[in-house]
Image (spheres, rainbow, N blue to C red):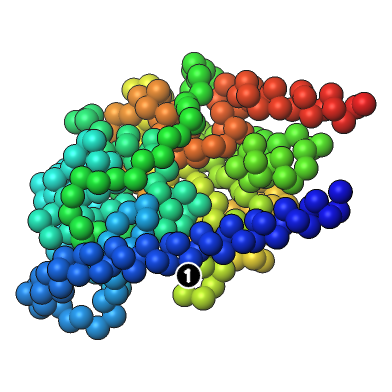
Amino acid sequence: MKEEIDSTSEEDRILIENYRKYVKEEAIRELEANRDTIQAFKDYVLSKGLGLDGLQFQYVPCTGIVATKTDLLSNLFRSASDKEGLYGFRVLKEHFCMKRDVPGFLFHERFMAMPHPFFRRGYAPHNNFAPHLVDMLWNFTDSAIDLSFALDSDRVRIDVNDTVYTEFDTWFGAPFKDDIKSIPDGTSRLAPPADFSHFHVEFFFSDVCYLDVHWDTKDGVRTFQAEELKSEKCTVTDNGTIYFPARYIHAEYDLSNKTFRHFDGAIHLYTKEECETRRKCHYTTSNLSMKPRSVKLFKMNGSIQTEMWKDYCCHFCSGNPLLYEYFSGSLPAHVVDVVTKLRARNSK
């Protein structure tokens, strides 16, 4: 058996090495094929009074030809973001063409703006977007709600066309019919089955170790907070510092109007020490003593129906069965099936 494992491992290493070689060669071909496009964009940058220092070009398979430079988008798109770094949906539609069938790209004649990299799978700038959430943002139509979201400030796509890289996503919203006012105040912590190995948590729970959900009520408003903690394998790096990202949701429910009046989603960035402390206690307890870096990704203000709030929560935390369990009272059927089969196998 050991010889078979070693042989397979060597074969995998060869496949990975060949794949990396192909990616490098593909990037060279694509950059050469788009040489005129790259030069035209350089000319455009110069026409805007910007220097070329620090301007770089990459071919990203899931995106296209990407120009990178610190604050590139904010220098090309002069409309100011709000104090949280978000751009209003209505303002974006005035300055860019938003095509519903090309979610994730804002069309300008010379470039395409994109959502913040934290909207992408694994928070990685080279990955594709988490499909359903970005599609929902691009197809937003509710005039009673002010929507805003974060953009990629340092990168724009410059091969302006309708070509997109599509990934299918089987994630879904959970049923949720509870009357908001009947939910008790306090904190709930959900976790994968205690007898699951780390491999199974990573595979079936998207590496989510805990989900903390908190409700409290004051002056006719119910406040909802939820934070998703993943294993220490999930990290992002910013200016040389390693952070442990946690998806965070905040919402306010108006008891008199029976709708949410505010809703936002963010990424909390914990240092290693903060992350270790955070894992040991529920959200409200730990939050009293630490304030992690926070990157807000989207925000809604207005009359937000419970169904919309629930759907955005589920798709913001795409792949997290614990949030589905919170809303529905049970894990998704496919996860329940896995739990049952694993426990039956382990009992033999």
Residue under label 1, please give it.
Answer: 238
Residue 53 occupies quadrant: bottom left
Label 1 crowd bin: few (<14), some (14–19), many (20+), radius 10 Å: few
Callout 1: helix, strand or loop?
A: strand
In-front residue for pair 182/144: 144
Give me the residue at 46% from left, 57% from top: 124
Q: Is residue 114 above or below residue 97?
A: below
On screen, residue 213 versus residue 114, left or right, reads right
In-front residue for pair 74/275: 74
Q: Is residue 276 above or below residue 322?
A: below
The residue positioned farthest toward the right in the image shown: 348
Q: Position of residue 159 (x, y in %)?
A: 20, 58
Residue 211 occupies quadrant: top right
* Quadrant of the drawing holding the C terminus: top right
Q: Is residue 154 visible?
A: no
In-front residue for pair 262/181: 262
Give me the residue at 47% from left, 70% from top: 238
Q: Position of residue 291 (x, y in %)?
A: 54, 60
Q: Is residue 198 visible?
A: yes
Q: Position of residue 259 (x, y in %)?
A: 36, 25
Give me the residue at 10% from left, 47% from top: 94
Q: Position of residue 212 (x, y in %)?
A: 61, 41
Q: Is residue 271 above or below residue 86?
A: below
On screen, residue 58 versus residue 10, left or right, reads left
In-front residue for pair 216/142: 142
Give me the residue at 56% from left, 68% from top: 242
In the image, what residue type sits under mark 1?
A: Asp
On screen, residue 254 versus residue 174, left or right, reads left
